[in-house]
Image (cartoon, helix red, strand yellow):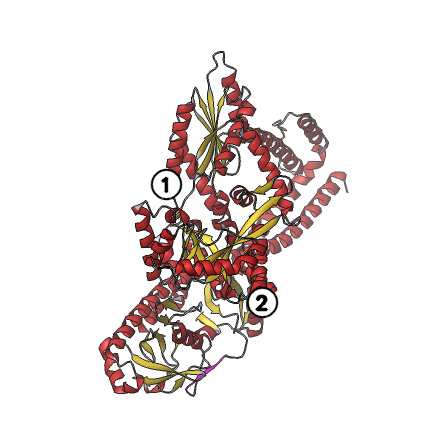
């Protein structure tokens, strides 16, 4: 056999083997890709279904709350019709009243020993109905009887009213009921109107999960079945509830939440549901059920009540695509093989010369001549090789072009901020140096702008909210600048403005305008976010004839603005360098102050205006530095807030104050309590509740003797977050006070919604009540409002007997101030307690 034939045969055999292997590998590769693609589609479909279900559940919940409100109205109407003594109410009267009020039934419940029973009812099944085994429902009834309000997380809570979630009827499991429970203390029974919740059921039939599943199946012929599994009960023995001799499964305990369960492979399905729920990832597998090959996907859905969506498709969908692809590949392979056999015979004679030509071009490409092309017009491996070389050459050319573009991008972002599109510090420096190098030197102003409490927004609402604020600030400030003026972003929440040919007056005017512009709220996802700025200003070359130092001077001035309470601007002065050095010294010293026992607590008594008794103290921190002496809290507390050290300092204050108070109680001060200030940063800590609980357990102080004072600034946080956190604090038994009321974000909205026990009137209102009628009106309003809200009122900063008598007349509950005592050390408090108590009693009970 000639060499040409041998080469042709070898080439043909090699190509044949390669084509066979390629088709086999491609078949399995394609199958895996199709399965992965199918899993992605099922995951998307599952999440789409879950979002539709979530939307429908939201609508159903809104409707349920509306029904709850109607039930409360019915309960109040029933209360007006019924005798407050249950013994004087007849079942026939309740039947007539149910029809009149348009509810299904009305039941009256009373407390009997450790049980709460339905005694009188228009529904015979509800009479003598025990609720002792009803779990949180029974707890809610107890709270209504004891407090006229309910605090458990479940159900709808209104004044004197609680409405449980709709569920299978306790008296008739064939129905779904919605109940309401009203008790305001004027009757000796709870009024319980309820209705058959046909309206919610009808809505759920129209837009609920089963309707969504049905619509999804009708829109996609490849879907065989969609099922909503309850991971807590699927595969487990049924959980029956027994009431009134009837066994039934509650809605939340049903193993199939929605859809139908066909094509059952129970053992595999149970394993898949549990695995999906445990891992939080999609689980899928192939199965043959009733001689039909199917593909199942189980998608876990995170919700208030998590569930797993099972989606089943006919595996034939995947197999048909695979078969079609296999046939196409076989046809292509046969064509290629025939082509190879025909031309391979002619290949040997041309094999050397083309290779040399290819190598020549490869060498050119290796030398950097990207884009060089091999001119060989052949349809064999050498032709393919030449094409690949050409493609490689073009790819290298395109890659180098792309690298050039990337370099241009890098060059751009070397001078511009990615988020806001503003110049960065490098470009602003360059611009400033160019202006400084002009023959005619004119003054330039640098405005160093830092956003106040920006980190709170970032931590609380996430970086997307922070980015929104940064872009919003950029847009607002840019709208105030002239064409030749520059705004740069130089850090997380720091901006630098360059104003050419600007004097003090113009810089001051712009700083005021910027502050006013930023005071307007930013609307983010329905929330009003408030942000202010601290601005430092320096003038080149007056403050420094060096650009870098001028910027540094503006930075120093900005920190002075921070120290002055934020939301203001300051011009640089030479003495600020010394203040900055002191700030650095204080920050370093503060990091070791606790372990060196440099902090101490002073206690200022609070006095009851009715009895003159000392009811407790406010703990006030003091810092005695070994070399700098006593340092004012007004100086180191803001610094602690800024650096985050306030968290560890605040925990030390809480622990020390609680420990000392418990020691005083053991020594005979049995009813004395303690108030501790809580900073906004502490309030944001995720482990706040655990910390307070741990301190109470460690010190042995009962929670009712502890009051945490928070400032109105928390009103700028997310309302739901604040309410939830305050409820957690109160759940410990600890009281909550709003400190410095009237000086911050005073709002009737948060007063109505926030759960607190005490309002503290700021001393700025108290000090001038003898000369300013406006402050008198403010105090009168605050006290009246607090009494309407049924919360305690304490006035701080009371220094004169006239102030005391005025506050007594207005029925202010407690007083705190130098009229009774300055803040005292532990030793001073113990030695002077009797003297202070006696003087307080005489002053409070003095007749004017």
Q: Is residue 478 left or right of residue 360?
A: left
| Residue 772: quarter of image | top left
As for residue 175 lying within the magenta part, the answer is no
Regarding mark 2 in the picture, which secondary structure is present there? helix
Q: How many labels does the image show?
A: 2
- Label drawn at residue 505: none
Residue 290 position, x and y percent, is: 53, 74
Mark 1 vs mark 2: give the one in front: 2
Q: What residue range appears in magenta?
A: 236-245
Residue 287 position, x and y percent, is: 56, 68
- The residue shown at (23%, 82%) is 96
Q: Examine the rendered structure and indicate whether residue 153 appears above or below residue 448.
A: below
Q: In which quarter of the image is the N terminus?
A: top right
CA neighbours of label 2 inside 10 A, class few (<14), some (14 to 19), many (20+)? few
Q: Examine the rendered structure and indicate whether residue 26 appears above or below residue 572.
A: below
Q: Is residue 46 left or right of residue 360?
A: left
* Prevalent SS, magenta region: loop
Depth check, front residue: 810 or 621: 810
Q: Examine the rendered structure and indicate whether residue 441 appears above or below residue 763.
A: above
Depth check, front residue: 174 or 391: 174
Residue 56 position, x and y percent, is: 38, 63
Res. 231 visible in picture: yes
As for residue 241 lying within the magenta part, the answer is yes
Depth check, front residue: 331 or 583: 583
Farthest top residue in view: 439
Regarding mark 1 in the picture, which secondary structure is present there? loop
- Label drawn at residue 666: 2
- Label drawn at residue 520: 1
CA neighbours of label 1 inside 10 A, class few (<14), some (14 to 19), many (20+)? few
Q: Are marks 1 and 2 in contact (CB under 8 Å)?
A: no
């Amino acid at each position: 056999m000639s060499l040409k034939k041998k080469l042709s045969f070898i080439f043909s055999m090699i190509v044949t083997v390669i084509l066979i292997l390629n088709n086999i590998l491609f078949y399995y590769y394609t199958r895996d890709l199709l399965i992965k693609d199918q899993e992605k589609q099922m995951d998307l479909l599952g999440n789409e279904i879950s979002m539709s279900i979530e939307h429908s559940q939201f609508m159903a919940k809104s409707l349920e709350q509306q029904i709850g409100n109607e039930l409360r109205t019915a309960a109040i109407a029933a209360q007006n019709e019924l005798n407050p003594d249950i013994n004087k109410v007849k079942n026939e009267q309740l039947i007539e009243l149910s029809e009149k009020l348009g509810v299904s039934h009305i039941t009256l419940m009373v407390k009997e020993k450790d049980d709460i029973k339905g005694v009188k009812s228009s529904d015979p099944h509800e009479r003598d109905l025990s609720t002792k085994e009803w779990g949180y429902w029974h707890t809610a009834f107890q709270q209504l009887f004891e407090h006229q309000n309910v605090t458990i997380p479940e159900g709808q809570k209104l004044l004197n009213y609680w409405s449980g979630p709709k569920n299978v009827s306790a008296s008739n499991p064939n129905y779904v009921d919605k109940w309401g429970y009203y008790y305001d203390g004027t009757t000796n029974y709870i009024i319980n109107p309820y209705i058959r919740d046909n309206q919610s059921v009808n809505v759920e039939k129209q837009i609920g999960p089963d309707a969504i599943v049905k619509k999804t199946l009708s829109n996609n012929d490849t879907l065989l079945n969609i099922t909503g599994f309850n991971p807590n009960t699927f595969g487990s023995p049924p959980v029956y509830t027994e009431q009134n001799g009837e066994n039934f499964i509650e809605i939340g305990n049903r193993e199939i939440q929605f859809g139908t369960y066909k094509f059952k492979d129970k053992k595999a399905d149970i394993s898949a549901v549990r695995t999906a729920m445990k891992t939080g990832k999609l689980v899928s597998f192939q199965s043959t059920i009733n001689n039909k090959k199917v593909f199942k996907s189980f998608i876990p859905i995170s919700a208030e009540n998590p569930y797993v969506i099972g989606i089943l498709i006919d595996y034939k969908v995947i197999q048909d695509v695979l078969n079609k692809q296999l046939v196409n590949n076989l046809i292509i392979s046969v064509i290629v093989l025939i082509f190879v056999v025909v031309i391979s015979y002619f290949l040997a004679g041309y094999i050397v010369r083309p290779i040399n030509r290819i190598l020549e071009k490869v060498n050119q490409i290796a030398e950097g001549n990207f884009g060089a092309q091999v001119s060989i017009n052949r349809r064999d491996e050498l032709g393919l090789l030449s094409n690949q070389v050409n493609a490689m050459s073009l790819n290298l050319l395109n890659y180098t072009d792309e690298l050039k573009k990337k370099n241009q991008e890098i060059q751009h972002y070397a001078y511009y901020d990615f988020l806001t599109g503003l110049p960065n510090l490098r470009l602003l420096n360059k611009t400033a140096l160019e202006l400084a190098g002009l023959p005619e030197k004119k003054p330039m102003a640098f405005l160093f702008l830092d956003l106040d409490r920006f980190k709170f927004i970032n931590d609380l609402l996430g970086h997307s909210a922070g980015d929104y604020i940064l872009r919003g600030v950029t847009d607002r400030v840019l709208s105030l600048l002239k064409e030749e003026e520059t705004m740069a972003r130089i850090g997380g929440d720091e901006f630098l403005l360059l104003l050419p040919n600007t004097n003090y007056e113009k810089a001051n005017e712009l700083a005021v305008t910027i502050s006013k512009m930023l005071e307007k709220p930013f609307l983010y996802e329905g929330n009003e976010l408030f942000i202010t700025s601290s601005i430092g200003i320096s003038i080149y070359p007056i403050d420094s004839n060096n650009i870098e130092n001028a910027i540094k001077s503006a930075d120093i001035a900005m920190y002075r603005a921070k120290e002055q309470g934020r939301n203001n601007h300051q011009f640089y002065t030479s003495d600020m360098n010394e203040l900055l050095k002191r700030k650095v010294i204080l920050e370093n010293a503060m990091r070791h102050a606790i372990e060196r026992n440099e902090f101490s607590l002073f206690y200022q008594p609070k006095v009851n205006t009715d009895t003159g008794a000392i009811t407790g103290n406010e703990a006030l921190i003091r810092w005695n530095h070994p070399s700098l002496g006593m340092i004012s809290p007004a100086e180191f507390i803001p610094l602690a807030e800024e650096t985050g050290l306030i968290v560890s300092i605040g925990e030390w204050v809480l622990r020390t104050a609680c420990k000392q108070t418990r020691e005083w109680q053991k020594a005979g001060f049995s009813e004395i309590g303690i108030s501790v200030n809580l900073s906004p940063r502490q309030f944001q800590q995720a482990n706040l509740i655990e910390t307070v609980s741990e301190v109470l357990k460690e010190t042995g102080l009962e929670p009712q003797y502890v009051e945490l004072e928070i400032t109105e600034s928390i009103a700028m946080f997310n309302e739901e977050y604040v309410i939830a956190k305050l409820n957690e604090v109160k759940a410990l038994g600890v009281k909550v006070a709003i400190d410095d009321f009237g000086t911050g974000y005073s709002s009737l909205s948060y007063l109505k919604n926030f759960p607190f026990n005490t309002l503290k009137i700021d001393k700025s209102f108290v000090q001038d009540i003898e000369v300013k009628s406006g402050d008198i009106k403010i105090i009168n309003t605050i006290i009246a409002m607090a009494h309407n809200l049924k919360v305690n009122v304490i006035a701080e900063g009371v220094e004169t007997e006239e102030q005391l008598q005025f506050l007594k007349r207005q029925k202010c509950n407690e007083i705190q101030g130098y009229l009774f005592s300055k803040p005292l050390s532990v030793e001073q408090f113990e030695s002077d307690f009797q003297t202070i108590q006696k003087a307080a009693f005489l002053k409070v009970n003095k007749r004017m």
